[in-house]
């Protein structure tokens, strides 16, 4: 699997990352083990997790898999380590961040995260306090690099500038945000800010929450996320007339290239300027294998241009 640097940092990751959002709920330990073994065997390294996934169960499942099936040193673990609320504060308070990080490490059974992703920008906490937590974690060896989740462009720039004034170890190297042919919002201000500061984008939902696979082109399959009560609204937010036009363009491109719509959509995100990796989730090994197949797909310039045109930012 292709690998690349995250922004201008020295952090190297597989350009397709494995998300663990369904682990501990829709995916049990056996299923997660199969996925992670297949992912590593294909050359994947980046695994993304969060304590909010299945109320922490996803990280516990990840820990079980690492203890029995996949060596920790084979992975680049990117994790979020705090839940809101508690006596130490919430959001980006130093106490909450460090306590959350410790809890995440305990659940996974590791002594460090390769990429500690802060859960966004907190206007109620001084930036210097947030950065002091980063400095403590990095110096203690509990985090190798730091990133942000879903910041606005000005928030990312603020953290980068303040971090640079304190010391290079506190400067974020990544920003994780939704980015796909159906959601090009980061191009308005986040991506320009990230590129200016040498920060790489980690794109989640690169398949447009599943819509870009074409599975919803003729309706809603009974076994799909859109058919489930808890995820229907999540998927429906990406189903409209505009998305239907984009999906049709993806289907046409896939037919012309002799590949899958999934591979076309994922390759488009993977190769966007500033993107360090595209993070995919999977129900099972078959779905994950389909996503990893995109690693072999290169989009011709004319197809990329056509997809850029039909999906232009709104």
Image (spheres, rainbow, N blue to C red):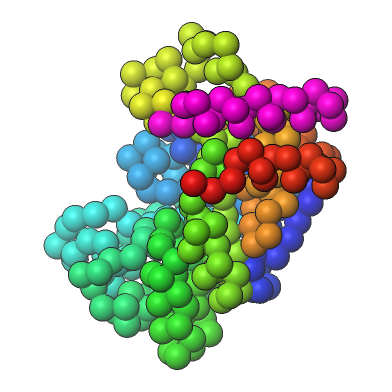
Q: Where does residue 47 sit, x and y in percent of width and height?
A: 58, 48
Q: Where does residue 2 sit, x and y in percent of width and height?
A: 79, 51
| 309 or 149: nearer the viewer | 309
From what the image shows, is residue 289 above or below residue 165? above
Q: Where does residue 54 sit, x and y in percent of width and height?
A: 37, 36
Asked whether residue 201 is drawn in magenta, I would say: no
Q: Where does residue 204 sit, x and y in percent of width and height?
A: 53, 45
From what the image shows, is residue 50 above or below residue 226? below
Residue drawn at (69%, 40%) of the image: 307
| 228 or 196: nearer the viewer | 196
Asked whether residue 258 is drawn in magenta, I would say: yes
Left or right of 14? Residue 201 is: left
Magenta range: 237-259
Q: Is residue 27 visible?
A: no
Main SS type for the magenta part?
helix
| 113 or 155: nearer the viewer | 155
Residue drawn at (39%, 17%) of the image: 228
> Residue 38: which quarter of the image?
top right
Left or right of 311? Residue 183 is: left
Q: Is residue 219 visible?
A: yes
Residue drawn at (67%, 45%) of the image: 308
Residue drawn at (55%, 62%) of the image: 191
């Amino acid at each position: 699997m292709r690998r690349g640097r995250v922004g201008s940092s020295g952090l190297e990751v597989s350009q397709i990352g494995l998300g663990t959002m369904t682990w501990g709920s829709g995916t049990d330990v056996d299923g997660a083990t199969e996925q992670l073994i297949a992912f590593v065997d294909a050359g994947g390294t980046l695994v993304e997790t969060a304590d909010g996934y299945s109320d922490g169960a996803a990280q516990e499942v990840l820990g079980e898999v690492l203890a029995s099936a996949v060596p920790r040193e084979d992975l680049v673990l990117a994790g979020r380590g705090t839940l809101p609320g508690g006596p130490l504060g919430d959001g980006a308070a130093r106490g909450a961040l460090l306590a959350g990080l410790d809890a995440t490490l305990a659940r996974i059974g590791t002594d460090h995260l390769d990429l500690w992703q802060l859960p966004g920008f907190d206007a109620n906490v001084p930036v210097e306090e947030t950065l002091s937590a980063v400095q403590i974690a990095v110096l203690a060896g509990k985090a190798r690099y730091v990133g942000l989740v879903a910041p606005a462009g000005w928030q990312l720039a603020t953290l980068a500038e303040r971090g640079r004034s304190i010391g290079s170890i506190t400067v974020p190297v990544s920003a994780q945000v939704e980015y796909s042919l159906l959601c090009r919002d980061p191009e308005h201000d986040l991506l320009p800010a990230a590129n200016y500061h040498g920060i790489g984008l980690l794109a989640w939902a690169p398949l447009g929450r599943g819509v870009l696979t074409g599975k919803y082109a003729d309706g809603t399959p009974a076994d799909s996320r859109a058919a489930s009560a808890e995820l229907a609204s999540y998927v429906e937010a990406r189903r409209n007339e505009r998305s239907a036009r984009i999906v049709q363009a993806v289907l046409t491109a896939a037919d012309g290239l002799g590949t899958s719509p999934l591979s076309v959509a994922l390759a488009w995100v993977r190769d966007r300027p500033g993107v360090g990796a595209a993070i995919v989730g999977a129900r099972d090994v078959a779905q994950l294998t389909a996503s990893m197949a995109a690693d072999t797909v290169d989009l011709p310039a004319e197809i990329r241009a056509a997809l850029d045109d039909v999906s232009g930012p709104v």
